[in-house]
Image (tube, rainbow, N blue to C red):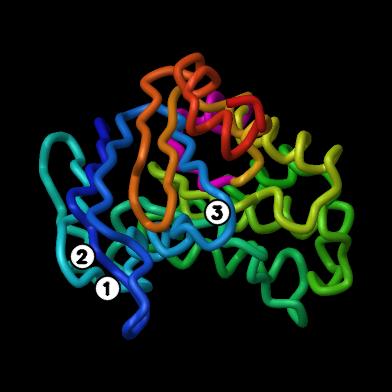
Amino acid sequence: MALELEILGIHAGYGAVRALQGVSMQVRDGETVALLGTNGNGKSTLMKCVMGNVRPTSGQILLKLDGVPHDLTRLSTEEIVGLGVALVPEGRRLFPRLTVEENLLLGAFRREARPHIAKNLELCYETFSVLKERRRQLAGSMSGGQQQMLAIARALMSSPKLLLVDEPSVGLSPLLVSNTVTMIKQLKEKHGLTVLMAEQNFHQAIRIADRGYLIVHGEIVFEGRTVEELEHNDMVKNYYLGTA
C-alpha cells in the first residue's frame, strides 16, 4: 500500500502559547525523515498533532493511502491508529505495573492487528530477545534501554504502516542511543515501514535518515533534501555543530 504524509500549514499550541506556526513538511512512502530541533521547539507537539492528541488551530495533515487522502485533523486518535499510524512517545509512556507481555498485547488494540497478535508477538520477541526473557517482568522495573525496546515493540504490535518515533534518545546513554537508532533502521528496512523521527541528537538522526527538516521556535527553517545538505547547512552547523 502506497503511503504519503503531507503536513500543510499547521498552527497549534496550548492556550495562549503558540507551539507551531505554519509548519509544512512531507514524508514519502518508505522514507525515514528526521525532524531536528532542540528541546522546546515544537517537535513533540507536531507528533501529537499527527496522532490527534493535539488539535491544530489551522492547517491540514493528510495521510494518503493508495492515493486516497485522509485528513487526520478531523479524525480521532483511535481512527488514526486504525489507518496504520503508530507512535513511540517521548519518555516511552509504558504501563509500569503491567508485565512486558501485557504492554505488548495492549499495542495490538488496532482492529487490523488483532488477527496477527501471535505473529507480531513472535516478531517482537525475535527482534528484542531480552523482552522474551523478561516477558513476565513488570515494565516499570526494567532499565531505560529495555523500556525503550518495549515501547518500540509495543508500536510494532499494531502492524503499523507509518511509525512516528519521538525523541528516542531521551534518558539513554550514548551507546544505548546508538543501538536504539540502529534498531529503528533495521525494523524499517525489514518491514517496509515509513518513519518520521523527531530527534535532537543530530549525529544519530542522520545515521538513518534519508533527509530531514530543522524546526526552530515552531517553524520549519530549513529542509534538507539529503543528509549532505543537512550537514553543510549553516543553521544546522550553528545549532548542532558550533562551526558556522
Q: Which residues are magenta?
A: 186-199
**Residue at screen point 16% across, 56% down:** 60
Q: Secondary structure at mark 2?
A: helix
**Residue at screen point 47% across, 49% down:** 164
Q: Earlier in the sequence, mark 3 or mark 2?
A: 2
Residue 196 figure quarter: top left
**How many residues crowd mark 2 within 10 Å: few (<14), some (14–19), many (20+)?**
many
**How many residues crowd mark 1 within 10 Å: few (<14), some (14–19), many (20+)?**
many
Q: Which mark is residue 55?
A: 1
Q: Secondary structure at mark 1?
A: loop
Can you give x and y, in whole percent of width and height, for residue 185 in the image?
60, 29
Q: Which mark is residue 166?
A: 3
Q: Is the C-beta separation of discs 1 and 2 under 8 Å?
A: yes
Q: Is the C-beta separation of discs 3 and 2 under 8 Å?
A: no
Viewer-side residue, 91 vs 122:
91
Q: Quadrant of the N terminus?
A: top left
**How many residues crowd mark 3 within 10 Å: few (<14), some (14–19), many (20+)?**
many
Can you give x and y, in whole percent of width and height, for residue 73 in the image?
20, 65
Q: Is residue 115 above or below residue 142?
A: above
Query: Which residue is tagged 2?
Result: 73
As measured in the structure, the alpha-carbon distance from the residue carrying label 1 to the one carrying label 2 is 7 Å
